[in-house]
């Protein structure tokens, strides 16, 4: 699996909000952002979660346990 880093810029209060949420979920900020991106992409592309996860490579961390 190829790993890519995508630089992004966000207002500091947005980053702080995401960091707090990630911490409460017990994942890193990268994992939190990745999962949020995937969930939104599934919705926009009209894919069910099970259909969408089947199309993606496996993450070693941060992926929902039931998928």
Image: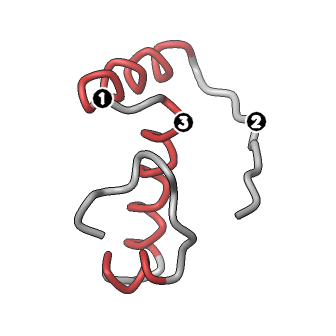
**What label does residue 7 carry, if any?**
2
Helix, strand or loop for disc 1: loop
Residue 3 placed where, x, y %?
73, 52
**What label does residue 30 carry, if any?**
3
Residue 4 placed where, x, y %?
76, 50
Direction from residue 2 to residue 57 in the image, left or right: left
Q: For the residues marked 2 and 3, what is the alpha-carbon distance in whole angstroms?
A: 11 Å
Judging depth in this view, the residue of 3 and 34 nearest the camera is: 3
Residue 55 placed where, x, y %?
52, 82
Q: Nearer the viewer, mark 2 or mark 1?
A: 1
Q: Is residue 23 above or below residue 7?
A: above
Estimate how packed mark 2 is, as few (under 14), some (14 to 19) or many (20 or more) residues with alpha carbons within 10 Å.
Answer: few
Residue at image position (30%, 57%) is 64
Quadrant location of the C terminus in the rendered image = bottom left
Direction from residue 21 to residue 28 in the image, left or right: right
**What label does residue 26 carry, if any?**
1
């Amino acid at each position: 699996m190829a790993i890519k880093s995508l630089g992004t810029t966000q207002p500091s209060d947005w980053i702080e909000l995401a960091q707090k949420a990630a911490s409460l979920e017990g994942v890193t900020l990268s994992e939190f952002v990745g999962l949020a991106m995937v969930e939104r992409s599934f919705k926009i592309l009209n894919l069910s979660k099970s259909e969408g996860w089947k199309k993606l490579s496996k993450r070693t961390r941060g992926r929902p346990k039931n998928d």
